[in-house]
Image (cartoon, grey):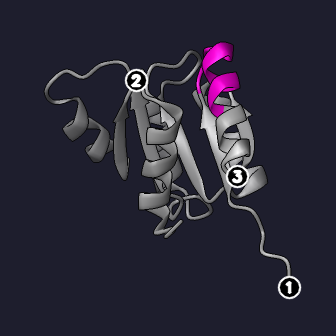
């Protein structure tokens, strides 16, 4: 039996950041679905049932805070872990992300291998 690759929904409004993380995630054995704003993230999460969502918090159209709250309030997506990605390492940001429903928090810029390590931790992946 062939094991299904884990699917990551990568949400970031910067194409260069998405490209860098997408390529490293694919190299690390993940399937990647992308969204460039919070509204797209909601649609992609419902359409593709990812195993985990990497959510930039500063997004156009709908920010990552609101998108995460909506994902966690929807029975179809509530169980999907959300890792907050943000360039804002200010005190209180982590608590706010947790209150919005984020399961983990990564400060950008981060090395792609550190992001993959966090994904594996959240998913309980022993690799």
Q: Which mark is residue 85?
A: none
Do the CB atoms of the residues marked 1 and 3 lie less than 8 Å apart? no
Q: Which mark is residue 1?
A: 1
What residue does disc 2 label? 108
Residue 78 image position (x, y, % from top left) = 51, 60
Q: Which mark sits nearer the N-terminus, 2 or 3?
A: 3
Do the CB atoms of the residues marked 1 and 2 lie less than 8 Å apart? no
For the residues labelled 1 and 3, the Cα–Cα distance comes to 18 Å
Quadrant in the picture for residue 99: top left
Q: Residue at x 78, y 51 (%)?
A: 47
**123 above or below 55?**
below
Q: Which mark sits nearer the N-terminus, 1 or 2?
A: 1
Q: Is residue 98 magenta?
A: no
> Dot 1: what SS?
loop
Q: Residue at x 85, y 77 (%)?
A: 2
Residue 58 image position (x, y, % from top left) = 45, 19
């Amino acid at each position: 039996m062939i094991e299904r690759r884990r699917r990551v929904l990568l949400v970031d409004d910067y194409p260069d950041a998405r490209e860098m993380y997408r390529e490293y995630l694919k190299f690390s054995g993940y399937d990647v679905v992308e969204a460039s704003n919070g509204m797209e993230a909601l649609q992609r999460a419902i359409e593709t049932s990812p195993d985990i969502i990497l959510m930039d918090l500063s997004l156009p159209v709908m920010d990552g805070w609101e998108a995460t709250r909506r994902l966690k309030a929807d029975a179809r997506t509530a169980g999907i872990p959300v890792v907050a990605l943000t360039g804002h390492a200010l005190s209180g940001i982590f608590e706010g992300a947790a209150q919005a429903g984020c399961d983990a928090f990564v400060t950008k810029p981060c090395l792609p291998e550190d992001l993959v390590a966090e994904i594996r931790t959240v998913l309980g992946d022993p690799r």
